[in-house]
Amino acid sequence: MPELPEVEVVRRGLARWVTGRIIDDVEVLDRRSLRRHTLGAEDFRGNLVGYRVTDVVRRGKFLWMPLGGEFPDGEEPVALLAHLGMSGQLLIEDTGAPDEKHLKVRITLSEATDPSAGDAGGPDDDGTILPRELRFIDQRIFGGMSVTSLQPTADGKAGGRGISGLPLIPREASHIARDPLDPDFSFEVFFARLRARRSGIKRALLDQGLISGIGNIYADEALWAAKLHYARATGTLRRPEALRLVEACRNVMIRALDAGGTSFDSLYVNVNGASGYFERSLEAYGREGRPCRRCAEENREILMRRETFMNRSSFSCPHCQPTPRGLRG
């Protein structure tokens, strides 16, 4: 499943390619990808065609594209909401390019040129012509698209990471906490809620209502960087340790963004179809039986371990991430 850095890579790509463009047409090839849009494919299409994409915003793993245009009096602003699920992809393609095997929705955008390639907007513009199709591909059909209303955020701040900074968010994403890369993320709010919990640290990190965008891989990486065991009780975490953990989460995600995210198979790609390379720099995840890169300088016999956690695997170092005393066998 794509984690926050992967979704942020997609958001940045979409922001460049679709912001400011008008939706000319919508073709739904598999209605199962619209199951969250309960009024059906025709209503989905009718709420998109003719409207302009004004931004691409992300909160946790939710992506939405606010739409600008003439809305009937009294109607709330709306957005095209996309959730990638386990295998969803949003790709930008040229018209006429072969359809992907699991193509579900095709959105045709107005003609446009890339401002970064020339002086866009004039008849003599030398900019590159941008591809006109936004395609949603989903092999396992756990993701989907819908048109949804936007509502004010609870804290009055931007709904998520985007350009406009509008204090609006889809109802479907309103329960999602801010992530460590969000400019409006509050450590004080996070720490108070973390200390009030009664669980292990990793379980807390995976709770999207506490802190968003962190999945199994990046949780292991951040805990390794912060030298904390995944089962350490949240109530015992001191303020400096919590600060170290949040900073570790932030640094891991920034490094992953620089590398384009992780990619263990062909299911995750960015909007241009390129896979990420962060998997080559993982310090903990998947390194069972290999020397800890931090402790190996002193003792090559200290090997990374794998333990079962919430029906998944957790990877850690027995030396620099010791098991809490009450859990030792």
Image (spheres, grey):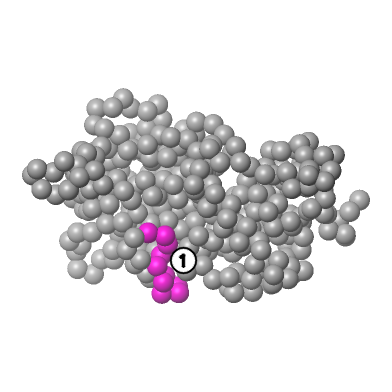
* Residue 240, horizontal then vertical, whole percent: 69, 70
- Compare residues 137 and 251 and report the one nearer the observer: 251
* Residue 76, horizontal then vertical, whole percent: 29, 66
Where does the magenta region start and end? 153-162
* Residue 19, horizontal then vertical, whole percent: 27, 52
Q: Residue at x 35, y 54 (%)?
A: 56
* Magenta stretch encompasses residue 156: yes
The part of the image, by quadrant, that contains residue 226 is bottom right
In this view, the residue farthest toward the front is: 297
Q: Main secondary structure of the magenta part?
A: loop
- Numbered-mark total: 1
Q: Is residue 232 left or right of residue 152?
A: right
Residue 313 against residue 239 in the figure, above or below:
above
Q: Is residue 3 left or right of residue 282?
A: left
SS at mark 1 in the image: loop
Residue 44 seen: no
Q: Which residue is mark 1?
A: 183
- Compare residues 37 and 15 and report the one nearer the observer: 15
Q: Residue at x 34, y 60 (%)?
A: 163
In the image, what residue type sits under mark 1?
A: Pro
* Magenta stretch encompasses residue 194: no
Q: Residue at x 40, y 67 (%)?
A: 158
The N terminus lies in quadrant: top right
Q: Residue at x 69, y 72 (%)?
A: 239
